[in-house]
Image: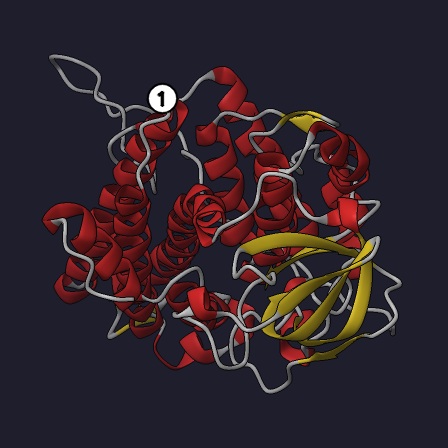
């Protein structure tokens, strides 16, 4: 791959509090509010959680933001970032042991927020590898399976993918048609998958298929795998620097022991998705923070009609409303992570956070784009990239409508879809 030219990162620190000198009052000192932490959520974090956030945030500022626009524009994946991601020691998220860091749900969410603040494609690459693929093995695998696959994945020596969605089955993935039939001492997989993040480059694919009894299970396919073909999906306007693929399985043989031991129904797939869906709420927050801070900085620098944009009432109103939505999103993410740590997280709770934050993030990005005017469509200003990437966030891991129906089932007791 040809050498990349680097572009300077924007100076604004996004995603964690920016402390300023306190304002002096005759009665008391009142510290100025941080740019994107208006309710001081930082004070609710542990020192360990702050350290993880700051480590990932520094990686984004130093290694991602200065160079990602070129990759995004040309729809190329930045392989050079994989060793740098590995050195962060974050793969595996909340999983303990097997080379994984055993992060708290809060720290894991902060990782997703910071990576999305840097770039949505990098966040998706990491989320698929660490949350979906490694998460499936950690949650549903036997002890032997976890010892076999998780350590090399934690070190990014093996890249993971999660193959659920099919060309004809997205929201109704329960009806998946990929099959796994037992033949002597092996499973034989046949079928097609689509929109599989990392699917063209993954060494380890967790493939969801239906067995002869109609039960859905996770089957680990390791490359090279004769009969497995992949094609990168072209023409995307979102998440352009990460590759999604269409996969075809033609009599792909894997050992019997490659079926995840504790997976035998679609409910198991749902458990994995619930565990990762709240991470998407954190991702939406990261995109929003990036857009807001870019707009805030621009409004202070851009002069029109003889004064900075920040001095106009309409612009201040937009910024205030953007910050209100971001603050609400922060508090949802914080509370959701506390519930996850207490093992109280329900599918409806995760869906509500994803539905709300993804929808509000699109609005925040649109306001930022408006404040930047014509310059808002330039990749150099980053907002356009985040705005485009949010279109994928709004859809993946369940569309807005599907999230609403998951919530609806929990609050009414009635299932509104098959």
| Residue 339 spot, x, y in % from top left | 32, 28
Picture layout, residue 145 above or below residue 403: above
Residue 82 visible in the snapshot: yes
Q: State left or right for residue 266 relative to residue 69.
A: left
Q: Is residue 285 above or below residue 57?
A: below
Q: In what element is the residue under mark 1?
A: loop
- Give the quarter of the image for residue 304: bottom left
Residue 179: name its quadrant.
bottom right
Question: Between residues 170 and 338, which one lies in front from this camera angle?
Answer: 170
Vertical comparison of 344 with 323: above or below: above
In the rendered structure, the answer to whether residue 359 lies left or right of residue 130 reads left
Task: Assign the N terminus to one quadrant of the image.
Answer: bottom right
* Residue 387: quarter of image: bottom left
Q: Position of residue 59 (x, y in %)?
A: 66, 42
Picture residue at 27% right of the left edge, 42% below the top: 349
Q: Total of numbered circles in the picture?
A: 1
Q: Quick check: 54 left or right of 275?
A: right
- Residue closest to the far bottom: 235
Quarter holding the C terminus? bottom left
Coordinates of residue 162 in the picture (x, y in percent): 62, 57
| Residue in the image at 42% along x and 49% along y | 277
Q: Image height check: is 380 above or below 138?
A: below
x%, y% of residue 192?
64, 77
Judging by the rendered image, the residue that carries numbered circle 1 is: 342
Q: Nearer the viewer, residue 359 or 30?
A: 359
Characterize the local packing of mark 1: few (<14), some (14-19) or many (20 or more) Cα atoms within 10 angstroms: few
Name the residue: 45% across, 50% down. 273
């Amino acid at each position: 791959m040809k050498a990349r030219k680097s572009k300077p990162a924007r100076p604004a620190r996004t995603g964690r509090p920016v402390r300023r000198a306190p304002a002096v009052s005759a009665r008391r000192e009142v510290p100025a509010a941080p740019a994107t932490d208006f309710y001081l959520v930082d004070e609710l974090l542990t020192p360990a959680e702050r350290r993880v956030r700051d480590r990932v945030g520094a990686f984004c500022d130093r290694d991602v933001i200065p160079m990602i626009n070129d990759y995004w524009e040309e729809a190329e994946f930045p392989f050079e970032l994989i060793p740098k991601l590995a050195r962060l020691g974050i793969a595996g998220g909340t999983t303990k042991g097997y080379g994984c860091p055993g992060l708290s749900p809060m720290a894991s969410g902060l990782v997703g927020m910071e990576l999305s603040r840097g770039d949505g494609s990098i966040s998706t690459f990491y989320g698929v590898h660490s949350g979906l693929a490694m998460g499936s093995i950690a949650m549903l695998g036997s002890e032997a399976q976890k010892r076999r696959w998780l350590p090399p994945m934690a070190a990014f020596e093996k890249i993971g993918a999660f193959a659920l969605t099919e060309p004809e089955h997205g929201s109704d993935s329960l009806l998946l048609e990929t099959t796994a039939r037992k033949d002597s001492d092996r499973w034989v997989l046949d079928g097609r998958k689509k929109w599989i993040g990392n699917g063209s480059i993954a060494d380890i694919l967790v493939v969801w298929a239906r067995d002869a009894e109609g039960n859905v299970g996770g089957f680990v396919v390791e490359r090279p795998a004769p009969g497995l073909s992949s094609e990168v999906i072209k023409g995307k306007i979102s998440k352009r620097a990460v590759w999604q693929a269409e996969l075809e399985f033609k009599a792909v043989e894997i050992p019997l022991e490659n079926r995840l031991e504790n997976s035998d129904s679609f409910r198991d797939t749902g458990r994995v998705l619930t565990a990762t869906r709240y991470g998407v709420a954190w991702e939406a927050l990261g995109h929003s923070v990036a857009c807001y801070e870019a707009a805030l900085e621009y409004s202070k620098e851009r002069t029109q009609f003889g004064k900075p944009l920040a001095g106009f009432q309409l612009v201040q109103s937009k910024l205030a409303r953007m910050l209100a939505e971001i603050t609400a999103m922060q508090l949802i993410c914080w509370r959701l992570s506390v519930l996850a740590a207490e093992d109280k997280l329900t599918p409806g709770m995760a869906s509500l956070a994803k539905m709300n934050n993804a929808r509000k993030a699109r609005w925040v990005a649109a306001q930022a784009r408006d404040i930047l005017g014509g310059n808002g469509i330039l990749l150099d200003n980053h907002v356009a990239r985040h705005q485009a990437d949010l279109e994928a966030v709004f859809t993946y891991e369940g569309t807005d409508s599907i999230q609403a129906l998951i919530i609806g089932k929990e609050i009414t007791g009635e299932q509104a879809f098959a």
